[in-house]
Image (cartoon, helix red, strand yellow):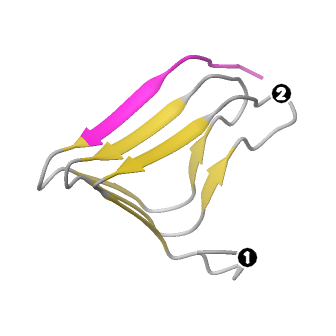
Amino acid sequence: STQSSNNVAMVTGVGSLWSNRTDLIVGNSGGGNRLVVSNGGTVFASDNIVLGANSNSFNNRIVVDGGSLRARNDAGTGT
């Protein structure tokens, strides 16, 4: 499988939107990945938001500073 590391996705500013139809995974296979949601930006996942999905996923972060991070989370395991 392919690994990816040290990536940054930024959703920043009022009206900025990232919307996924399924799970949103930050750090599926690899480390040092970040999702930053700030200054009125919004991220929405129709299913779950997963941080560090596999055993080789480490030091991944989701930072929310003045933005919104929302998930439907049908599994009922968190918010």
Say if 42 sits above or below 8 in the image.
below
Q: Which SS does the magenta portion mostly show?
A: loop
Q: Which residues are magenta?
A: 1-11
Q: Are marks 2 and 1 in contact (CB under 8 Å)?
A: no
Q: Secondary structure at mark 1?
A: loop
Q: Residue at x 12, y 56 (%)?
A: 15
Tell which of 60 and 27 is nearer to you.
60
- Residue type indicated by callout 2: Asn
Question: On residue 56, which mark appears?
Answer: 2
Image spot of residue 74 (x, y percent): 62, 81
Number of disc labels? 2
Q: Which mark is residue 11?
A: none
Extreme front residue here? Answer: 65
Does 63 appear above or below 58?
A: below
Judged left or right of residue 46, residue 65 is left
Q: Residues within 10 Å of mark 1 (few under 14, many from 20)?
A: few
Q: CA distance from mark 2 to mark 1?
A: 22 Å
Q: Earlier in the sequence, mark 2 or mark 1?
A: 2
Query: Relative to the observer, which residue lies in front, 62 or 21?
Result: 62
Q: Could you tell me which residue is drawn at 62 percent across and 18 percent down?
A: 5
Q: Amino acid at mark 1?
A: Thr
Where is residue 41? Give x, y as percent.
24, 52
Image quarter where the C terminus lies is bottom right
Residue at 69 percent of width and 23 percent of height = 31
Residue 77: give its label.
1
